[in-house]
Image (cartoon, rainbow, N blue to C red):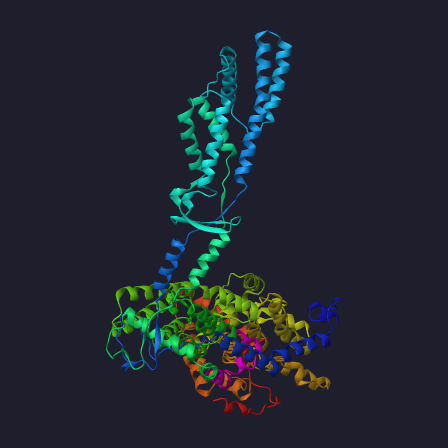
Amino acid sequence: MGILEKLGLAPKKRQGAPVIGEKKKKQEEASSLKHNPYLRTFILIVFLGVIVASIPESTYKEPINYNIGEPWRADDLTAPFTFAIQKSDQELEKERQTIRETTPPIFHKKPDVQISVQSKLDSLFQGLSSIKKGYSNWQQSKKEHKSEEAQRDSLQFEKLKNRSPVNLSESAWRTILDNYASVSSQNSNASGGTNNQFSDVSLKEQLQKLIAEVLESGVLDIPKSELSNDEITIRDFQKRTEQTLNLVNVRDLPEAKEYAQYRLSRNFYDDLANAGNEIFAQIIQPNYLFNKEETQARIQDALDEISTSKGAVAQGQVIIRRGDIVTPEKYNMLQSLADARAQNASDLERWLRYGGDIIAVVAILTIFFFYLYLYRRYIFVDNSLLTLVLIAFSLVIVSSALVYHLDDISPFIVPIAIAPIILTIIFDSRVGLLSTITLALLTGLINGNNFEFVTATTVACSLGLFSVRDIKQRSQFFFTTPGIVFGSYLVVVLGFGMTTFDSWSALGSEVLFIAINAIFILFTYPLILLFEKSFNVTTDFSLLELSDTNLPLLKTLMTKAPGTFHHSLQVSNLAEAAAGAIRANGLLCRVGGLYHDIGKMENPGYFTENQTESNEHDKLKPRMSALVIKAHVSNGVKIAEEHGLPEVIIDFIRTHHGDSLIKFFWEKAKEQADTSKKEIREEDFRYDGPLPQTKETGILLLADCIEASSRAMKDPNYQKLENLIDKMIDERVNEGHLSKTPLTFQDIRTIKETFLNILVGIYHSRVEYPDDEKEEEKDTQEQQEKNDEVDLEETPATDDMPEHPDSPKKPPRVDEYYNS
């Protein structure tokens, strides 16, 4: 156990760690939920419910798409029954606006306003006598130079003035009080005579008459500028009357104050008139109060009484003939016919139409789901992936249903291409293409069986998804794809516009919505990132990020195990080229090749490519050496999980050796067993697997062994490399390492040719210089010594040695012959 702990192979005891059985149980529960058929049925039923709910109510239009300005392409249309011609939206809105502008606003008369105002006026003048008296005492004390009494009388005067019901300015008080003093003086000198022009009594009487006159004509509580009508309605609840008045016969508060100032200025001198105007402005109150609720209710009653029709079409009357241009009047008649049919339709007819739409939806979706079940079974049986597909569908379909109910927005604004592009990037272009056809048919059904929309959507989405099959740069996604979608929509819409003689304004409006559609395509990128995190899927965007050799994990590999890092680079290049040749995912192979040997970072000195002088395996027994070699797979899986690498990359680490035999140490163990008579097990010298199950993991297994073998070859040339590749790959095929992959014999032949072309290019002969001859001989001798040691980790590196005569021959597998 000591050597195991030293090599990091002993099991670690972690406090609080879950028991293996419990962890396996949780994984089994998650897996069973992921593939639960009842949950899958529930998901499909919910999705179908969303689609059915998105279908708009039947509009009962004629089975032909028509627009204003286009020729009528169907047969002559006659009225099947007598129906009313509906007013257009513009006509109805004009009538509504007229009602809003001509309906008089309603005011309530407040009868007690005049009493309240008169009370304030009386209170003012009743207190005025005491204020005048206080003012007179203060002035008398000042005249007699009695400072203490003058100060006391001044305070008393201010106190009396503050008790007044109105708050007049100092100039107004002074005018009134000076006038009082002047009147008093004149009254004392005259023999009982009074001057009405300067008398406070005459001012009070004048204000009383003015208030009565103004309130009699009416004072509004809101400015006239806020009223759009020339007339108002006055309701007097006391007298139970209602009358309509012209605005010129009533005043608002600013007009009432202005009128008072005019009248007072004609009867009094300026200062007294201004004082009287201040009193009027503070005590006057509106007696006509605006009632907004009753006004709106009257307007609404008038709006409800608007007739929606204007005439009728008799049964048998020709509505439009074939070839006639659809004018606004004809269009309105066609819409009126559709509305009449909808109103006259029975519940049975409505349900039949709705049921027909549901059948059409189910038929369209059946094609897509049958394709998934037959050709993409891994998506259909995986509830997580199936949910991802259905959510992408639902986003587009619900958006189309919402836009359909907006009259001023074209259905071309909905970015249908988002869903096919997402499915193409996550899965493949065939899934994306079929989803394009499915979504085009469904959204076309939602938009009133619009053939133009279906055609444009199919063309634009198909070309758009083909542009993202192999994403290499972000600019390809942010510029190329939206541009292709925009151009495709534009061409199809322009073509249909030419056939239907659309006006340039109508085409311009459609182009605007198509441009917005293309801009919305940019939201695909964040949606893909959201789907990746939510459903644990890996796309080319993630692979492009993982292929950066400056990432911390790969830089650590380069530092700790530089030979392994160089080997991984070569393997990734070979695998990527081979994958491209057989139309597999080259980017996935490249990333898998970069990370497949990260487990060697745990014990880099035990692998030949990282050794410089000593060989660590000389200190170990063959079984222990095999254990160390095998451990780099499990260590790699552990490191990958700790760094959050996607499961699809971890599969490359698990399967890049399959269950192959570590031949060198197996032969060495057998030799030692022959001398010591100990029994050894072949299972101890085999990798734990599993076998590769995809084209990409199978390609990497081949690229790994070919790269290691070619690197150990002495003086490689075309013939040697070709023999080596044929031998290595044929052995892997015969041993069944590719039995679970979908690789065909044609694929294997193509992979061999690709490997050969690349390796010949790498190991091509070069011109030898005289100064390099001695160095070349030295390098050749060192290489020969190194080849004799044999690659201790990669089993193909031992294939240049003759096999042990007692080595058991493994019979060829049969099941791989069914892969083609």
Extent of the magenta region: 365-388
Query: Residue 558 or 378: which is nearer the viewer?
Result: 378
For this orientation, the residue located farthest to the left is 323
- Compared across the picture, whether 745 is left or right of 13 comes to left
Res 618 visible: yes
Return the x and y of residue 742 as percentages of the image width and height: 50, 85
Q: Quadrant of residue 153?
A: top right
Q: Is residue 235 above or below residue 663?
A: above
Return the x and y of residue 818 as percentages of the image width and height: 50, 91
Q: Quadrant of residue 486?
A: bottom left
Res 756 visible: no
- Compared across the picture, whether 752 is left or right of 121 comes to left
Query: Residue 658 or 71: which is nearer the viewer?
Result: 71
Query: Residue 160 or 711: which is nearer the viewer?
Result: 160
Q: Is residue 54 above or below residue 109?
A: below
Report how many numbered discs are placed on residues in the image: 0
Residue 368 lies in the magenta stretch? yes
Query: Residue 782 or 726: which is nearer the viewer?
Result: 726
Overall secondary structure of the magenta stretch? helix
Q: Is residue 65 above or below residue 523?
A: below
- Compared across the picture, whether 648 is left or right of 470 comes to right
What residue is at 40 percent from the left and 44 percent from the top?
225
Return the x and y of residue 116 as percentages of the image width and height: 55, 37
Quadrant placement of the N terminus: bottom right
Residue 316 lies in the magenta stretch? no
What residue is at 50 percent from the left and 42 percent from the top?
287
Return the x and y of residue 61 as percentages of the image width and height: 37, 77
For this orientation, the residue located farthest to the top is 144
